[in-house]
């Protein structure tokens, strides 16, 4: 009932926002695997790397996906520097059929880069990756190292060619206006250094914002999504994924 109410409250306010982007995912999640998730400590330590993967399971491959994922995560967890893995089921959202979201935290970039060549050669990796389509997969490090909480917006954006400086300037202007709104507590920005399926797609940024409540998100969406600052910012990138967790 709470989820249905939140969806109804956000749907009208979110529509103008969604029109500004090529939206890959907008979903509500429930954790199904991994230790208790605390965003206050997730990838918080300097140098730690956060992987966020949004996948669409191929039709009829759900059983294989879960079986191979368990084997893949067990193998991944055997490498030095792999700290924790989390899995979420999608309980609601836009175009959410057969979507699954996973997160993995690595000790640092060096540990991740060292394991990638070996893990990609494993038969279990091939079997696992054949069960789904990658919607978005980003490896990012924190650029702020500020504590987070359980109410979080995650946006994965690919900067358009030649728009790097415009992206940074427009984001700064929008964030300044966003922070002036009541109920916006913190924001974070991550820059990707490895992505899938394009491994050198480093012009991808992951932004996170903490809000006090869904009502705050609704009110801010109504105020800011039609603003010149928002229009200028959204013109500099293509949205790869957008989720609330």
Image (cartoon, helix red, strand yellow):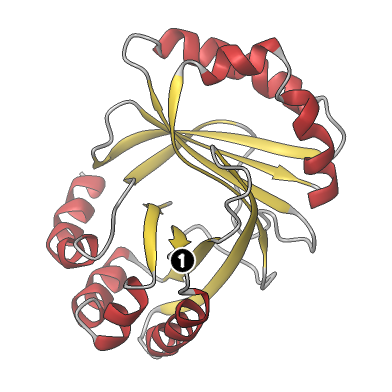
Q: Where 43 sits versus 146, above or below?
A: above
Picture residue at 36% right of the left edge, 77% below the top: 233
Q: Is residue 160 left or right of residue 43?
A: left
In which image quadrant can residue 39 be found?
bottom right
Which quadrant of the view contains residue 103? top right
Decide: is 40 above or below 55: below
Q: Is residue 139 left or right of residue 135?
A: right
List x then y, in percent, for residue 177: 38, 89
Q: Is residue 108 visible?
A: no
Q: Which residue is mark 1?
A: 161
Residue appearing at x 58%, y 19% in the figure: 69
Q: Left or right of 9: which side holds 104? A: right
The mark tally for this picture is 1
Question: In this rendering, is residue 190 above or below 201?
Answer: below
For this rendering, which residue is in front, 196 or 58?
196
> In the current view of this chain or complex, which residue is farthest to the front?
162
Q: Nearer the viewer, residue 181 or 63?
A: 63
Mark 1 surroundings: few (<14), some (14-19) or many (≥20) residues within 10 A: few
Q: Residue at x 33, y 46 (%)?
A: 24
Is label 1 in a helix, a strand or a loop?
Answer: loop
Nearer to me, 11 or 98? 98
From the image, which quarter does the N terminus lie in? Answer: top left
Q: Residue at x 19, y 80 (%)?
A: 226
The answer to whether residue 235 of the structure is visible from this angle is yes
Residue 162: image x %, image y %? Answer: 47, 72
- The x, y position of residue 73, in whole percent, is 67, 24
Seen as rendered, the residue at the extreme right is 80
State the image coordinates of residue 121 (x, y, percent, origin top left). Answer: 73, 19
Please determine whether, in this image, residue 241 is positioned above or below residue 223.
above
């Amino acid at each position: 009932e709470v989820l249905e109410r939140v969806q109804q409250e956000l749907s009208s306010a979110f529509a103008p926002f969604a029109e500004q982007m090529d939206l890959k995912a907008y979903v509500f999640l429930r954790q199904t695997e991994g230790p208790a998730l605390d965003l206050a400590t997730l990838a918080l330590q300097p140098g730690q790397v956060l992987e966020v993967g949004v996948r669409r399971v191929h039709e009829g491959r759900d059983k294989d996906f879960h079986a191979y994922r368990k084997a893949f995560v067990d193998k991944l967890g055997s490498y030095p520097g792999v700290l924790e893995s989390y899995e979420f089921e999608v309980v609601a959202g836009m175009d959410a059929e057969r979507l699954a979201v996973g997160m993995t935290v690595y000790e640092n970039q060096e540990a991740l880069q060292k394991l990638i060549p070996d893990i990609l050669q494993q038969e279990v990796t091939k079997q696992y990756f054949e069960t789904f389509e990658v919607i978005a997969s980003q490896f990012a490090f924190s650029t702020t190292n500020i504590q987070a909480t359980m109410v979080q917006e995650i946006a994965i954006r690919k900067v358009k060619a030649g728009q790097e400086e415009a992206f940074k300037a427009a984001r700064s202007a929008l964030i300044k206006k966003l922070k002036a709104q009541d109920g916006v507590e913190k924001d974070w920005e991550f820059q990707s250094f490895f992505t899938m399926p394009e491994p050198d797609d480093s012009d991808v940024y992951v932004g996170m914002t903490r809000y006090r409540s869904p009502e705050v998100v609704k009110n801010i969406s109504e105020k800011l999504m039609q603003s010149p600052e928002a229009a200028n910012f959204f013109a500099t990138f293509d949205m790869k994924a957008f989720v609330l967790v």
